Each structure stands twice: as C-alpha cells, then as structure tokens.
Image (cartoon, rainbow, N blue to C red):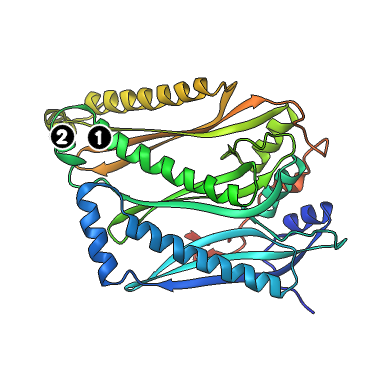
Amino acid sequence: MTKITGLSGNEIYLLDAKGYEAGDFVVGNCVNSMGFLRSLGSGLSNLAGGEVAQVTQQIHDARLLAFTRMVAEAKKHGACGVAGVTSGLMHQGAHSEFLFTGSCIHDKAKSTNRFFTSAGNAQELYCHMDAGYQPLQHVFGNIAYSLGLGGGLMGGLKRLAKGEIREYSNVINATRHRALGRLVTEAKKEKANAVVGIRTQVMIWHSAHEMTMTGTAAHNPALSDNGMVTSDLTGEELWTMAKLGYAPMRLLLSTSVYSLGMMGGMKSFFQSFTQGELPELSNLVLEAREVAMSRLKLEADSIGADTVVGVKTFIHHIGGGLIEFLAIGTAVRKTAGTGVQTPELPAQAILHDKDTWIDSGRHTLERE
C-alpha cells in the first residue's frame, strides 16, 4: 500500500543507513478551552507575578493528550517509532488546538523492542544516533508565567531608575529554569541520561507568557547515569563535538532585565528626533549583555565545563521601558568514550531541504 510520509528524501536516506524505513504521517490533536474558572484563577495569579499554575497545567495536559493520540496512531500502523515529531498551536476563536505531527518509522530487521519518539527531524535523529545517543522519547516541559503588577512594589519603583531590576530578572530566571527542570523530570521517567536537541519557544497564551522546551530523551552509554545531560546543540553540532571527544554537560540560561529609567527614557525620546547614536540605549544594552554573559560564565565554571558552545543572545522588549537580555548555550567537557560511528557526516545530514511551495512570491510556507 502507498505510504504518505512527512519525511524528505534526505531523511529517508539517513534512516535507511541506520536500518529504518519511512512510514505513514501521523497526527494527534486536542482542542481546548480555558473555561471560566481557570481564566479567573489565572487572572488572580497574574497579580503576584511568577508562574500561573492553572495555565501551565492546562497547556501541559492538552499537549500530553495530543501527543498520546499521535503515538497511539503510530502504533496502529505497526511502527517502531515516530521521527520528526513537531508540536503546534492554533487559535480558533475562544479555543486553542494543540497539535502533534510526525512520521512513522519501521525497523527493517524487526529487532527494535522499544517504541521511541524523536523531536526534531530525521537528519538530527541520525546525528544523535551516530554520536551514541539512542532516542527514547520526545519530552517537553512548560511554564506559564507573568511579571505581575510591576514585579512587586519594589520592582515597580525601580522602573523609575536606570539599571537592572533584579526582581524581574529573578522571576524570569526562575520560570525558565523551572521549565527546564520539568523537561529533565520527564526524561528521567524514561531512564534517559541526556536530553538532546532542546528547542525553546515563548508565546502569549490567554494573557500570560508560556515557555515550552522540547527535546529528545536519550541514553548514551559513555555518559554517567547519575546525572542528566541537557543540550540545545543542533544535531550536526553535537556530532561534531562528539567526534572531537566532547560531551555536553548542561544547557545554561541567563537573563537580565533592565530599565532605561524615567530620565533615561526622556533623554532617548528627545534624542530620537536627531540623527545619530542613542547613548542611553547603547549603554543599557551593553550593560545588560555583560551581566547576563558573566552569570553564564559563573555557572559554567561552577560545573567544571571546558567551554560553552553555541551561545545565542536575544533581546526582548517587555514594554514599559524594560528589556530582557537572554544568553543561552551548552556547556561541554572532554569525556572519555565519546565518539561517532561514521568517520564523516553524510551530506544528506547537513543539506537542509528547500521549500518548494511559494505563496505569491511573498511568503514561503514552512515545512513541518
């Protein structure tokens, strides 16, 4: 019978090299409503700032139900796993649809005993497996949060002055690390010793911010089973570092929230009418960056990392004269027994598939 798969030619080629063949495209969904009581509860939680537990739980439950339905469909097809698992969210009026999609894969030798799911595409899956990370389960951790009314009275007052507002930094740092902790908890249930390919997404959902971290829980015999490795390196990066003898240690996150201050804001406002640099803003962003990066380095030093790889920085304008500067990267260290199975990474694992559908020459539709 004809198979309908979401896997590309490159992905099918790589799976074949690992003894798998492509199967059917599978979907799981859940249409969800906040409901009056939960909306009321989340509104009250927003006043204090921090996690909005009602929203966190509802989003988690809806995602889990959609994911479970996708897995059930894959098992009906006799698959040994699902590759390229992706999640989505679509708003439909007062309701939200949580969606999981992926493609079944089948073990050609019929030797796989455990069903597994993998986040990311099959190109990344190949890199993980070749570097010794056997996939177990697609896992996710989330948190819905709010800064509250000014991050508390002290945080509100500090908005008037220029500089970091630690109350805001602490709220956001705590929420981001809590989502990572929940991701790790789910991985431990699968007897994993690593979560690789972590991706982070932040969105607005029913008046709260929601952050989701997804990744693939995996087991690598070269790593200790006493801790949990976390990494946001791409599959190619992870493979390359493994070939050099490095293993990831921990995904590091550091946030600093800064206020331009009332006087600084007024100065920048008037300066914006003239051409040239806005020194108040330049200095603010520079200082925020230095604070976030120094905290990242301190954490890396505390765990004995050799280096922090793939550091990415983001600036988010929160509003009200506030900016968040986020630094994120993976700490790595030379580890005995780390290596790869293939001497050279195949071109099919590096070449990214091009989009072939263009909408009116303006918008390129993203491939799942």
At 63% from the left and 52% from the top, the residue drawn is 190
Q: Is residue 241 left or right of residue 326?
A: right
The residue beneath circle 1 is 167
Where residue 266 appears, x then y in whole percent? 12, 32
Within 10 angstroms of label 1, few (less than 14), some, or many (20 or more) residues? many
How many discs appear? 2
Where residue 20 appears, x then y in whole percent? 80, 59
The residue beneath circle 2 is 154
Viewer-closest of 188 and 30? 188
Where residue 8 appears, x then y in whole percent? 70, 60
Dot 2 falls on a residue whose secondary structure is helix
On the question of residue 361 being in view, the answer is no
Viewer-closest of 294 and 180? 180
Q: Earlier in the sequence, mark 2 or mark 1?
A: 2
Dot 1 falls on a residue whose secondary structure is helix
Check if mark 2's residue and mark 1's residue have beta carbons within 8 Å: yes
Query: Image height check: is 265 above or below 302?
Result: below
> Callout 1, which amino acid?
Glu
Query: Image height check: is 196 above or below 29?
Result: above
At 48% from the left and 43% from the top, the residue drawn is 181
At 24% from the left and 31% from the top, the residue drawn is 165
Quarter of the view holding residue 336: top right
Quadrant location, the C terminus: bottom right
Marks 2 and 1, Cα distance to the nearest angstrom?
8 Å
Within 10 angstroms of label 2, few (less than 14), some, or many (20 or more) residues? few
At 45% from the left and 21% from the top, the residue drawn is 298
On the question of residue 308 being in view, the answer is yes
> Callout 2, which amino acid?
Met
Quarter of the view holding residue 108: bottom right
Q: Residue furthest bottom?
A: 1
Where residue 321 appears, x then y in whole percent? 20, 38
Query: Image height check: is 102 above or below 17?
Result: below
